[in-house]
Each structure stands twice: as structure tokens, then as C-alpha cells.
Image (tube, helix red, strand yellow):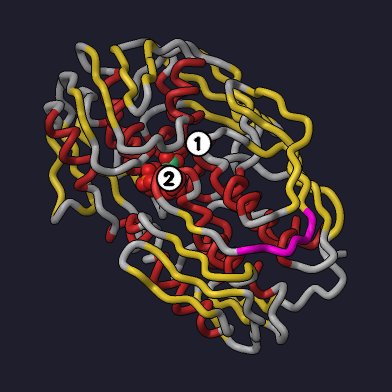
Amino acid sequence: MQKVVKNISNGLKGEITIPSDKSISHRAVMFASLANGKSVIKNFSKGQDPLSSLNVCKSLGIEAEFKNDLLIINSSGKFSAPQHKLDCGNSGTTMRLMSGILAGQNFNSTLTGDESLSKRPMRRVIEPLSLMGADIKSSDFKAPLNISGKILHSIDYVSKLASAQVKSCILLAGLNAEGKTSFTEPYVSRNHTEIMLRYMGANINTYKNTVTIEKSELEPETIEICGDISSAAFFIVAGLIVPNSKIILKNVGLNPTRTGIIEVAEKMGANIEILDKKTVSGEDVGDIQISYSELKACTIEGEIIPRLIDELPVIAVLATQAKGTTIIKDAQDLRNKESDRIKAVVTELKKIGADIEETPDGFIINGKKHLTGGVEVETYHDHRLAMSLYVAGLICEKPLSINGFEWVGISFPEFEKLFNVITL
Ligand code: S3P
């Protein structure tokens, strides 16, 4: 589907509520399925990725039904052998987290995915799981993953990557393994797994960059899911770069392991205010007020990278409007996402007049540049590319035609509807 985006001349104005967090939704449905009893999930994401996790859990015998805004999960706390292959769709989180759960079951299973997911690296979970005694067969460490359920034992794993998916996979395997399993990463990645497992009664502790878990039973719970800061990111950037804008984003998750984009925007001189901060189901939540701002370039590197990894495509758009040279480094894993996001962002933003260069692990962007538009751009089957280009289109001189816009539905089906609320 092609979407044509036009320049917004009189600014974005108003207030919107940001829909449910994708990362937390995956975890809520998986962990509720592992708990013996009835769990209630409030505000489960309508994105295709979390629905893949829900469908995988259902294929493993879990009862789940929607009642208005609630997702009710009834489980005996045990999965049963699936009748068919488990389709993770486009979702790396479903595949990597489920592999940690399935490796320790007393049955065999196969995880499959779409074309993009079947190209993504799975060695990062297969290797540590194998050290725990797992039996996972694949071709070249890519999906499909054929998992023969085994009794797992604990490990102390030191990961070269700061990755919440790898960390969560090992912690979930550790939840069902004898002994104490620990996972250490070079920088702290998003910690929703740790927060939710603790909230549901698991024996789990964090010290600096190391998380330790012991075999535990989970208690069923009511889990309320906040808005997704990775979805809010598109509105944050749009509010900062579209002249005359002033918007408020309500109910946004503000977990410090996810708020790198706010820190970077503030460093660039952005006019951002956090209002009404509170805690919901163990997660920090608040409203974000954003006004159009004159921005200056900055360097983004090191420990902040995992805290804004999914926002880098739209941060690249932001940097085109900041005075000076923005350098983004240490982000080589961006090449392993739903697309090679370094190559894709550079190729597409160049088409609309950005001064942006690819480096092995990031970008060099010179601003402030006038964006031209009047061309067709591609989304590479990648939802975050589609939404980042849409935001760029709002300040292009001529209309921007975005091919493959339907991929937005992977994480944020409400995206355009919400944009319309603040452009009218
Ligand atoms: C996610 C972790 C991140 C992120 C992905 C969601 C999660 O991936 O990019 O969109 O829910 O755990 P990595 O763990 O591979 O960095």
C-alpha cells in the first residue's frame, strides 16, 4: 500500500493517548500463560507482533479471550505439545523468548517466521541455550528452529551483546532450570522481563549488569500495560521538527531502560516536559509534552544505544533538523533488525535531500537540511522505517509517497488515525 504524506504547515496540536507497549505485551501473554490460574491483561497491544505471541501461546494449549479492553488468560501453568509448527510471523521477540521457554518443555516444537524473521540471527539464543542442555536444530542458526524439549541446567552467561531478547530468553530458560542462572550484558538493555517476573513472584535479582534467576512458579496477576515509548517516539520527533507544534502524549511508559530518546532530545535542546509520573504494574508511566524546538547536533554512543535502539531510524530524521554533525555509533545490531536499518535509513533519507552517511555501526548526519520530498521511498517490510519516513514527510516541501506503508500494523495499527487527531 502506498501512502502519500503532505507537509503540515500550521503545526501539530492537541493530546493523544499512546497505545500499548509491544515489548510488555509479548511478556504479559507469555508469563500469564506460565502462571497457574487466571490472569487479566489490561490494554494488550493490537499490533501483529504481540498477536503472534498470543497465537503461539494458544497453539500450546492456553485459553485466551478478549473481553472489551481486557485479555483474559486461563492456564494450568503448563504448555502442551503443539499440533503444528508455531508461527512467529515477523516477531523476533516471539521467536527468541519462546525458544527459551520451549527448550525446557517435555515435548518437541518448531518455531517458524516470515521471510524477514527467517533471515535474522538466532545463534545469539541457540548458543547459550545449548550451554544449558537445550537441543535446537536449525540451518545456519536461522529459523525454522526445531526444538527437542530437554531438562535444562543453570549457567552463568556473559553476553557480548546488550540484548533484552537474549537476556529474556535465558532468564525464561532459567525459570525452569535447576540452580541459579545468571545473565550479564555489557550495558543494561530493557528490563521489562525482570520487572514482570518479579511482579509475578519469581525469584529474580539484578545487580549492576547481571540478572540472576532461580527456578520459580509464577502467580497469575492483573497486568496493566502502559503506552509504548517506541510508538511515542514518532510523535516526539514530529512535535520537535514540525514548526508551531505543541502536543501532549498521554500514558507513555518511562522505564529508564527505554527513555534514551528523551535524553538525546533534551541534549539536542528539545522542549520536552514530563507530566504526571506514576507507577503502573511495576513500570514508570507519565505524559510527555513536546513543543517545536531549535535543535543542535550531538553524539549518540555507548550505554545509551540499547535504551533507544528501536528509535534510531526516527532519531536519524530528527538529526537532519539539528544544526551541526550528529554522530551515531555502537549501533551495529541495527543491521539485524526487521531490515538492515542503517542501510535502509541512509538510502531513503538521501532520496529526500538529507545529508547522511552510513558507517559500519551507525550514521553521520549533517543538519539542518531542507527536505525535498516529491519522490517515492521504500519501507523494506519494516514498520519503523515506514513510520520514520512518514514523520520526515511532514516537513518535506513536496508530497512524499511511501511504498509498503501497511507494515505499520506490525507494532502500531493506530498510527495514522492518531496523527490525524493532532493535524486537524
Ligand atoms: C525487544 C528488544 C530489542 C528491540 C526489539 C524488542 C524486546 O531487541 O530491538 O524491538 O522486546 O525484548 P534486541 O534484544 O535484539 O536488542
Which residue is identified by label 1? Answer: 257
Residue 288 on the magenta span: no
Give the camera-side residue of 208 and 396: 208
Which residue is identified by label 2? Answer: 306
Q: Taking the image as four quarters, which one is ligand 1 found in? A: top left
> Disc 2 beta carbon < 8 A from ligand 1?
yes
How far across and down, in percent of the image, does residue 391 sit? Answer: 66, 67
Which portion, as a residue range, is magenta? 291-296
Cα–Cα gap, marks 1 and 2: 8 Å
Q: Is residue 383 left or right of residue 295?
A: left
Three-letter amino acid code at disc 2? Pro
> Disc 1 beta carbon < 8 A from ligand 1?
no
Give the camera-side residue of 182 and 200: 182
Which residue is drawn at the image coordinates 43% and 72% (left, top)? 344
Q: Is residue 186 visible?
A: yes
How far across and down, in percent of the image, does residue 385 sit? Answer: 52, 66
Quarter containing the N terminus: bottom right
Give the camera-side residue of 65 and 143: 143
Residue 293 on the magenta span: yes
* Pointer 1 local density, CA inside 10 Å: few below 14, some 14–19, many at least 20: some
Name above or below for residue 145 compared with residue 311: above
Three-letter amino acid code at disc 1? Thr
Q: Quadrant of residue 109?
A: top left
